[in-house]
Amino acid sequence: MTLDSKLSLPPNETLGLADEIGPPGVVITDIDLRSLLNGFDVAAGAHLLWPTAQVILISGLPVNHTGKALGPRDHYLQKPFSCTHLLGAIANVVDKARRE
């Protein structure tokens, strides 16, 4: 599997990257972005812009700490996690997307 990554700090810039790089297969975002947007906002925007994109939301808190439910293309990864665990989560969502 080949992984290409792009880093963008402000959430609104992240959602604008598709114009530069094409639609992503996986979007990874923290839930608490300390911004006007949170990770659920990024996920919703990603799903609108890129209907096939999978989203991995990460947080140091339990998945239900916001009271928001994950969507069918959203996946949760609780911090701390190892690089191996992150790469495994990415591989799992890519595999899931290929089977759909």
Image (cartoon, rainbow, N blue to C red):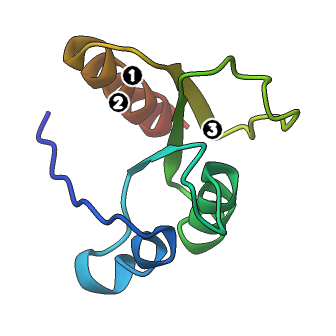
Cβ atoms under marks 1 and 3 closer than 8 Å: no
**Left or right: 37, with 85 as reference point:** right
Q: Give the tally of numbered discs.
A: 3
Q: Residues within 10 Å of mark 1 (few under 14, many from 20)?
A: some
Cβ atoms under marks 2 and 1 closer than 8 Å: yes
Q: Residues within 10 Å of mark 3 (few under 14, many from 20)?
A: many
Q: Nearer the viewer, residue 63 or 60?
A: 60
Which amino acid, by three-letter code, is at mark 1?
A: Ala
Q: Residues within 10 Å of mark 2 (few under 14, many from 20)?
A: many
**Left or right: 84, with 30 as reference point:** left
Which amino acid, by three-letter code, is at mark 2?
A: Ile
Name the quarter where the C terminus is drawn. top right
**Left or right: 62, with 46 as reference point:** right
Give whichever of discs 1 and 3 has the lower sequence position.
3
**In the rendered image of this protein, does residue 85 appear above or below residue 50?**
above
Q: Position of residue 2 (x, y in %)?
A: 11, 41
Give whichever of discs 2 and 3 has the lower sequence position.
3
Which amino acid, by three-letter code, is at mark 3?
A: Asp
User: Which secondary structure lies at badge 2?
Assistant: helix
Residue on which the image places disc 1: 89
Q: Could you tell me how far apart the alpha carbons at marks 2 and 3 are, in whole angstroms?
A: 12 Å
User: Which secondary structure lies at badge 1?
Assistant: helix
Residue on which the image places disc 2: 90
Q: Residue furthest left?
A: 2
Residue on which the image places disc 3: 74
